[in-house]
Image: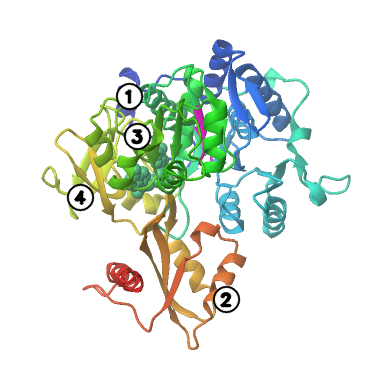
């Protein structure tokens, strides 16, 4: 197994194999097999691009050949940061063909996150788009390469490398177009061990630096097959990808891999807006899609008497909503408004995914976040001392199973507290279990803000704020928000004269932080409320800002 990763105990792994959860398939072989079976069926639709399974497979081979010529080898880490374009699939499967490991970054990430991912994983390459949504990724990549004192990653650009292009006297950026070989060379293809790590997924994070999640071919493909089955995907499935497509939810729950598993079609939406997505549902005959709660709210409002009321959404069978708590009131509106079934999805890139089932009662679907995928998923709901709480009471959710990791990549000290001694992952979520085994998310114990599905580690933002010369101390907490569920409030103790709010936020932006991590509100304070043991009481800060918001709203 990749160095720095924690394997399942041998006896447990043997059981998962014997029980048929782990089948010895790799992600590379997965696409090959589906390409043979579904050859000319359409696999991918993105803008004007339409690729059949055979075409995607052939492209992956040719790109793998080109990447090998560039020197990318089995076991190499490659940071991938692309918007929802067809090339995502080509690149991902080309890397699997080589046995190289994609490190999945989000399009919203900026210098701070991407430079960290490149250096922490010792990436040999960084694959970016030229521009997207008004941002030039090439300039960011140039800064990363310039700042790297060691072996900087090679930069591959989907689109135009522009002024950074490779030239006779400097190894600059190369266009994906030029990397792709004219003919595939089967000699470059690797046959990785299905039990080994296939890629690194980014965790929502609770500490100063993001953690990386190593997922194996075997464990991931089990979750994909089981998810496709639970969601009744078929060759007739047309899946609309609205979230950044390499996020764990649209990748595996059941996501694009679930669709490829069954021979269906993936339509990529360039953005999640109702204008874009409801049009695509109508024109492409979409049958299933996956969204975060704020996007579901926008779609509901656009259809219920809004600008998209005229859309024919009759093809849509299922809307999956997850990534953050979906309010019961909103959940009740889905079926009558959109004319499709709702499925709540409570998952995590570390593993465990819960779904409400297609044949569940409407009450279960609107009031719970579903139940685990697998009979082999072990779930414990415990108090602060790891003792089980009585059924129906809220407690910390711990879990282990055939697709839940046993450790983050290369952080042994953190793993010692993020997992129990017997291998349960401490999710940081507070849940209640119903007698029939469904989970209701009641809150969160981890120091994280869930901003409409986008996870923000408070400590990461605090560290950035603390870098400002006029800041003495900082505490970042969630504040309630009707649309996003939560937004970010930063409490700051100034050092002498308080900085201007706008100046502080500009400082954070210039440090190259993803926009969704920039605090929505800044409050200055002289001191922070303390807990009994003298730590900052974030609970008191959350209560204070919530009260202030309610007062300002005149409630
Ligand atoms: C409340 N909180 C939720 C829900 C996730 C499928 C779906 C989502 C993710 C995901 C995923 C929630 N209600 N319905 O990977 O495969 C919060 C919890 C959880 C954290 C994980 C998938 N659905 N959450 O959101 O790794 O706090 O995965 O621990 O981004 O999101 O975040 P992430």
**Which residue lies under the disc numbered 2?**
503
Cα gap from disc 4 to disc 2, whole angstroms = 41 Å
**Which residue lies under the disc numbered 1?**
16
Quadrant position of residue 112: bottom right
Cα gap from disc 3 to disc 2, whole angstroms = 45 Å
| Rendered position, 551 above or below 329 | below
**Residue 350 seen:** no
Closer to viewer: mark 1 or mark 3: 3
Nearer-N-terminus badge (2/1): 1
Nearer-N-terminus badge (4/3): 3
| Rendered position, 142 above or below 322 | below
Label of residue 335 in the image: 3
Label of residue 31 in the image: none
Query: Which image quarter has ligand 1?
Result: top left
Looking at the picture, tell me which residue is in the foreground, 360 or 142: 360
Magenta highlight range: 239-245
Label of residue 395 in the image: 4
């Amino acid at each position: 197994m990749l160095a720095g990763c924690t394997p399942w105990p041998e006896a447990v792994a043997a059981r998962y194999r014997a029980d048929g959860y782990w089948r010895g398939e790799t992600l590379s072989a997965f696409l090959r097999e589906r390409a043979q079976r579904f050859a000319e069926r359409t696999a991918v639709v993105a803008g004007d691009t339409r690729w059949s399974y055979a075409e995607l497979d052939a492209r992956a081979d040719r790109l793998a050949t080109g990447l090998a010529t560039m020197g990318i080898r089995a076991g190499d880490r490659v940071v991938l940061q692309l918007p929802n374009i067809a090339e995502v699939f080509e690149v991902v499967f080309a890397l699997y063909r080589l046995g190289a490991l994609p490190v999945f970054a989000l399009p919203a990430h900026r210098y701070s996150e991407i430079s960290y991912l490149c250096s922490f994983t010792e990436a040999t390459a960084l694959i970016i788009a030229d521009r997207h949504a008004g941002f030039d990724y090439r300039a960011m990549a140039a800064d990363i390469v310039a700042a790297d004192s060691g072996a900087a990653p090679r930069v591959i650009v989907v689109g135009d490398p522009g002024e950074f292009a490779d030239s006779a006297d400097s190894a600059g950026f190369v266009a994906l177009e030029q990397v792709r070989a004219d003919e595939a060379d089967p000699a470059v293809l690797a046959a990785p061990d299905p039990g080994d790590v296939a890629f690194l997924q980014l965790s929502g994070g609770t500490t100063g630096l993001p953690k990386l999640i190593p997922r194996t071919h075997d464990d991931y493909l089990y979750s994909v097959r089981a998810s496709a089955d639970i969601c009744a995907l078929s060759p007739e499935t047309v899946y609309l990808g609205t979230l950044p497509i390499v996020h764990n939810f649209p990748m595996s729950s059941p996501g694009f891999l679930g669709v490829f598993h069954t021979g269906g079609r993936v339509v990529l939406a360039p953005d999640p807006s109702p204008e874009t997505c409801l049009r695509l549902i109508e024109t492409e005959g979409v049958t299933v899609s996956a969204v975060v709660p704020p996007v579901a709210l926008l779609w509901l409002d656009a259809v219920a008497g809004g600008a998209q009321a005229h859309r024919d959404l009759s093809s849509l069978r299922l809307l999956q909503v997850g990534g953050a708590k979906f309010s019961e009131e909103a959940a009740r509106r889905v079926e009558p408004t959109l004319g499709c079934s709702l499925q709540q999805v409570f998952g995590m890139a570390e593993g465990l995914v819960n779904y409400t089932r297609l044949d569940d009662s409407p009450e279960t679907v609107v009031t719970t976040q579903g139940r685990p995928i697998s009979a082999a998923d072990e779930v414990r709901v415990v108090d602060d001392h790891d003792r089980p709480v009585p059924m129906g009471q809220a407690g910390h959710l711990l879990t282990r199973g055939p697709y839940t990791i046993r450790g983050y990549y290369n952080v042994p000290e953190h793993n010692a507290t993020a997992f129990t001694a017997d291998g349960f992952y401490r999710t940081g979520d507070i849940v209640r279990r119903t007698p029939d085994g469904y989970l209701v998310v009641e809150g969160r114990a981890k120091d994280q803000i869930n901003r409409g599905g986008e996870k923000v580690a408070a400590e990461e933002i605090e560290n950035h704020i603390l870098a400002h010369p006029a800041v003495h101390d900082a505490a970042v907490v969630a504040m309630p928000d009707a649309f996003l569920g939560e937004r970010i409030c930063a409490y700051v103790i100034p050092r002498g004269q308080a900085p201007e709010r706008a100046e502080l936020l500009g400082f954070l932006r210039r440090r190259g932080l993803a926009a969704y991590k920039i605090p929505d509100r800044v409050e200055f304070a002289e001191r922070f409320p303390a807990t009994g043991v003298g730590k900052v009481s974030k609970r008191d800060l959350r209560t204070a800002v919530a009260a202030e918001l309610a007062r300002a709203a005149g409630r």
